[in-house]
Image (spheres, rainbow, N blue to C red):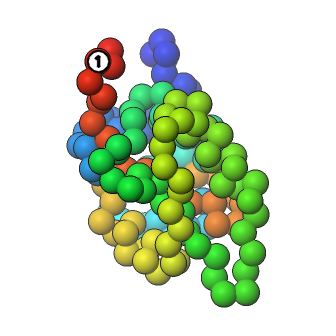
């Protein structure tokens, strides 16, 4: 165990976050997401909910401040409704660490899958809420921020 690193962050996830460069993306996917079909680098975080992972990850890395939308979620399919509490819970974790982050962008399901194919990694979680997937774009450490 390391001091200051949330136990939801596995050694494999910590290594992945370290190896990612600025502009790389990581997908936090719900338990039903086709992670292995979309990306060759899949990390298992079974049983862990995405808000808890966001808390652990965003304590260690910042989001890209040079793009309009460093956070992306899947838009609802025609006829489906989004549960606003899902985005609210994700955003609460983001705002604890990076409150100046722009609003979360929503993209169509198949566009989300295509973006996942280009992501650095996919983390398969225990999240079970509908449309419970989010892409994070890693940023550059802000000037003056202690590393």
Residue 124 appears in the rendering:
no
34 shown above or below 56? below
Counting the numbered discs, the total is 1
Task: Please rate how many residues cluster around mark 1, counting C-alpha atoms within 10 Å: few if below 14, some from 14 to 19, many from 20.
Answer: few
90 shown above or below 83? above
128 shown above or below 16? below
Q: Determine whether the residue tagged by mark 1 lies in a helix, strand or loop.
A: loop
81 shown above or below 40? below
* Residue ranking furthest to the top: 3
* Residue at 33%, 19% in the rendered image: 145
* Residue at 29%, 30% in the rendered image: 141
Left or right position of 56 against 11: right
- Return the x and y of residue 22 as percentages of the image width and height: 25, 43
Between 42 and 51, the residue placed more toward the observer is 51
* Residue at 49%, 38% in the rendered image: 100
- Return the x and y of residue 82 as percentages of the image width and height: 72, 69
Left or right position of 117 against 106: left
Left or right position of 89 against 99: right
- Return the x and y of residue 23 as percentages of the image width and height: 27, 50
Left or right position of 37 against 32: left
Residue 94 appears in the rendering:
yes
* Residue at 65%, 40% in the rendered image: 92
Circle 1 sits on which residue?
Answer: 144
Q: Quarter holding the C terminus?
A: top left
**Which quadrant of the view contains residue 73?**
bottom right
- Return the x and y of residue 54 as percentages of the image width and height: 55, 40
């Amino acid at each position: 165990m390391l001091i200051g690193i949330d136990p939801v962050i596995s050694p494999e996830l910590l290594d992945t976050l370290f190896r990612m460069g600025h502009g790389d993306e990581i997908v936090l996917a719900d338990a039903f997401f086709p992670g292995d079909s979309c990306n060759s680098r899949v990390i298992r975080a079974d049983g862990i909910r995405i808000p808890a992972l966001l808390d652990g990850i965003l304590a260690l890395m910042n989001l890209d401040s040079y793009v309009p939308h460093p956070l992306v979620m899947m838009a609802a399919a025609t006829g489906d409704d989004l549960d606003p509490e899902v985005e609210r819970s994700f955003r609460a974790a983001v705002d604890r660490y990076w409150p100046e982050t722009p609003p979360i962008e929503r993209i169509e399901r198949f566009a989300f899958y295509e973006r996942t194919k280009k992501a650095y990694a996919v983390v398969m979680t225990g999240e079970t809420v509908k449309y419970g997937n989010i892409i994070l774009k890693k940023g550059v450490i802000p000037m003056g921020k202690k590393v």
